[in-house]
Image: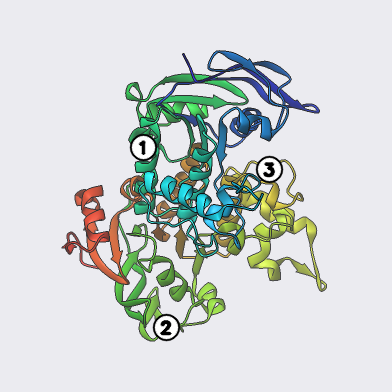
Amino acid sequence: MPRLELRHASKSFGRVRALIDGSLVLWPGEVHALLGENGAGKSTLVKILAGVHQPDGGELRMDGTARRFASPGEARDAGIAVIYQEPTLFFDLSIAENIYMGRQPVDRLGRIDYGAMHREVDALLASLGVELTAERLVRGLSIADQQVVEIAKALSLNASVLIMDEPTAALSLPEVERLFAIVRKLRERDVAILFITHRLEEVFALTQHVTIMRDGEKVFDAPTSELSTGAIVAKMVGRDLESFYPKADVTPGEVLLAVRGLTRIGVFKDISFEVRAGEIVALAGLVGAGRSEVARAIFGIDPLDAGEIRIAGKPLAPGRPAAAVKAGLALVPEDRRQQGLALELSIARNASMTVLGRLVRHGLISAGREVQLASQWGKRLQLKAGDLNAPVGTLSGGNQQKVVLGKWLATGPRVLIIDEPTRGIDVGAKAEVYGALAELVREGMAVLMISSELPEVLGMADRVLVMHEGRITAAIARAEATEERIMSAALGERDIHLGRAA
C-alpha cells in the first residue's frame, strides 16, 4: 500500500491558480524526486502535504485512509515532516532542546527530565551515524549539521513521510555524501522520502522515482532508471534542448586575465593562471579550498600579501574594486541575495546600479533610461519579469541571477568572474545562464567560473583548475577532465597537470 497518495489536488489564490492538478504517490522505503522549474507548483503541493494550505479540491490518503490537514500540527501528528533548505532552529538552545521543543519528557515531579531527553537524542544521532551530541548548542553548527538535527527531530516524531526541500543547496560535496548516507538509512526504516532538488545528478544518485510538474500540473512520472538527463530537462521545460551545456567552439585569443603568485597568508598561496579571450576556465574544489577568496582578491575586495594581476597585459592595482571595474573586470558573487542585490529596490535600479553615472541628467537619475537599460539586458538574458519597477526580491532565484549578471555586463567587462553561477536555480534557468555564458565567450569575453557542480564544470569549461587547501593542485584540459580526476585533486590525493600549463 502506498504510504501517501495525493490525487488531483488544486489550489488557487484569488485569480492565480497555483496548483491545477497535483498528483503524487509515495511508497515506503522509496526516495521520490519532485522536479519542476520555479513556479511549477512544487511549493504549493508541499504546503498542502504539510498542512500549511488546504486544497480547493482533490484527495489525500495516508496508508489508505483519507486525510485533510487543517494545520501543520495535524500533518506532523499524522507522520509528515518537512525539512526546508534553511533549517528553522533555536540557535541558543541545545540540540536536544530543539528536537523535543514543546514536548520534553518530564519526571514524576513534572520537571523536564534532561537525562532521559539527552539519552534519547544521543541514541537518535548515533543511529544516523553522525558525531553530534545532545547537549551541544545549535549555534555554530553548519547548515549540514542543522539539517541532521531536523532529521533527528522528524525521527523522534515517528515520521513516516519526510519531505526534503532543496536540502543540498548550501552543502559541500562531503556534506552531500553524508546526507545521502543518512537518507539511505531512512529508506531502510521504510520512511517515504520526497526529495526536491534542482541538481539532476542527485536525482540519478539517490532517487528511485521521478515526478515532474509544469505550470501547476503533474506532467510526467516514471522510475528514475528509465530516464536520462535530456528526457528530464525536456519534460520540465516543455521543449527539447539541443544541448543542456551549449559549449561554444571558440579559438582562444589573447590573455585577458593573468595572475602570478597571488598569496594571502593563511587563505591561499602562490596562485598563478591565465584566462584568454573566448575561454571559460573553471576553478573547482571543495568548499573552503579558497576559490571564492581568490576571486575576491582579484577583484580587490580582499587584500593580498603578494602577487601580480594583469588585465589585457596591464597591471591592476590590488585592493581597489573601482579600478578593477574600470580595467574591464566584473564579479558576480556567490551569494546573490546578500552580496549581489538590494532586494527591496526595483529590478531596474538593481540592473543599472553599476552604471548609474551614465543615467544622470541635471543631477537626477533618469528613471526612463534606467528602465530602458534594464529592459535591454533583460531581453538579452531572457529575464522573466512583468514589471521592472517591482522589487527584485519578488523574482525567482534564476531571474535574480540574471539581474546580477546583467548589472555587471552593463559595465562592458572584458573579463567576467562568476561564482557559483547556477546555485539554487531551476533547470530551465540553468540552461539559459549557460547559453548566456556561451554567447559571451563567442563575443570574446574571458570567463573565470567558480563552481561546485562537477557536471557544470565538465560541460562548460575549456580548462579546469582545481584547488585544495589554498593551492592549485591540478590544471586539467577539457578533453582529459573527469569527475574522478577533479575530485582526486580536490581531495589533495595527487597532482595532475594536463594540457596547456596554467
- Looking at the image, is 446 positioned above or below residue 192? below
Q: Amino acid at mark 3?
A: Ala
Q: Secondary structure at mark 1?
A: helix
| Eye-nearest disc, 2 or 3 | 2
**Residue behind mark 2:** 304
Report the mark closest to the observer, 3 or 1: 1
Between marks 1 and 2 in the image, the one whose residue lies nearer the viewer: 1
N-terminal-most mark, 1 or 2: 1
The residue at 62%/31% (across/down) is: 77
Residue type marked 1? Lys
**Residue 185 bears which disc, if any?**
1
Determine the residue positioned at 48% across, 56% down. Answer: 134
Q: Check contact, mark 1 vs mark 2: CB within 8 A.
A: no
Residue 139 figure quarter: bottom right
Name the residue tied to disc 3. 385
Q: Kindly identify the amino acid type of the residue bearing the numbered disc 2.
A: Leu
Of 335 and 33, which appears nearest the observer? 33
Q: Picture coordinates of residue 52 (x, y %)?
A: 69, 34
Which image quarter is the C terminus in?
bottom left
Identify which residue, 63 or 243, lies in the foreground: 63
Report, in whole angstroms, how far the alpha carbon at label 3 lies from the one at label 1: 42 Å
Q: Nearer the viewer, residue 348 or 286?
A: 286
For mark 1, does the 10 Å Cα neighbourhood hold few (<14), some (14 to 19), or many (20 or more) residues? Answer: some
The Cα–Cα distance between marks 2 and 3, rounded to whole angstroms, is 40 Å
Q: Please, what secondary structure does the residue beneath circle 3 have? A: loop
